[in-house]
Image (cartoon, rainbow, N blue to C red):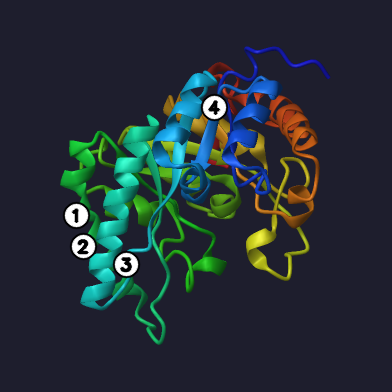
Amino acid sequence: MDIDQATLRRLSLNTMTTKNWTLPEAVDGSVRAGLPAVGLWRDRVAEVGLDAAAKRVRDAGLRVSSLCRGGFLTAADAAGQRAALEDNRAAIIEAATLGTDALIMVVGGLPEGDRDLAGARQRVADRLAELVPFAKEHGVRMVLEPLHPMYVADRAVLSTLGQALDIASGHPADAVAVVVDTFHVFWDPQLPEQIARAGREGRVASYQVCDFNLPIASDALLSRGMMGDGVIDFRAITSMIAATGYDGDIEVEIFNAAIWAMNGDDVLATMARRYAELVHPYLDPAAADPAPADR
């Protein structure tokens, strides 16, 4: 299947999809595949150094669609809170240096021994409020990522887009926004309404696509799949995103041991083909599902 550059103009490789590639390998592979953008993880950036990473991406002619990740803001003790604020300020500076305004925030789960979800969510809101002036100063948006409820205890006490938007709503949209990740939110019966709300508020900062595979892997973190291999209706969700007017990059972010073991160029070729078949046709609002909110 030949795919023209116009089809790929918004497609971004999230470096987690090719976990075994270094940052230079991911950049070079993206160029070979004709992709215009990469979504970077901080560990890959750290391996080569921040300035070197920024230069490598810039010299390759690529955009940085997002930086992952900030967050982990749920610590209940003062030392943990100070450490979280320090790390997130560093992440904001890294995002600005790399040329992206989107810092993906995985907000954190319950501290050890803690069962108070409401209290943990309040601490997320409190820490975000402390970070907003610093983020605005550097032109970076903190992009809240609700995670599937199976991760609520250890990774993210925000499980729905509505919860993320409720926290974001107290801040300017250019400081706190949200990412819609199909793997994490496809199940939510309120998804049409909440995506429309995010659009009205100008808070859709990123759209990430991958599938939800069955059976769930023994390590639930690795149950993401290539688009088309699982149960997600990409037409419906992409149509909802298109209706908001979001016109930014679309990242493919996959945690999957079998995909990580594949040749990276083959992964990108499959990724581009599935994107062209299952996502791209529904990015034009004129071609979108006529009434996704009525599903």
Give amino acid for label 3. Answer: Arg
For numbered disc 2, what is the local secondary structure? helix
Image position of 1 with respect to 106: above or below: above
Image position of 216 with respect to 41: above or below: below
Is residue 295 visible in the rendered structure shown here? yes
Give amino acid for label 1. Answer: Ala
Residue 95 image-quadrant placement: top left
CA separation in Å, label 3 and label 1: 13 Å
Q: Which residue is mark 1?
A: 129
CA separation in Å, label 4 and label 2: 33 Å
Disc 1 and disc 2 in contact, CB within 8 angstroms:
yes
Q: Which residue is mark 4?
A: 37
For numbered disc 3, what is the local secondary structure? helix
For numbered disc 4, what is the local secondary structure? strand
- On screen, residue 72 versus residue 123, left or right, reads right
Instruction: Select label 4 or label 2 by which is in front.
Output: 4
Quadrant of the image containing the N terminus: top right
Number of the label disc, if any, that sits on residue 69: none
CA separation in Å, label 4 and label 1: 30 Å
Picture coordinates of residue 206, whole percent (x, y): 46, 37
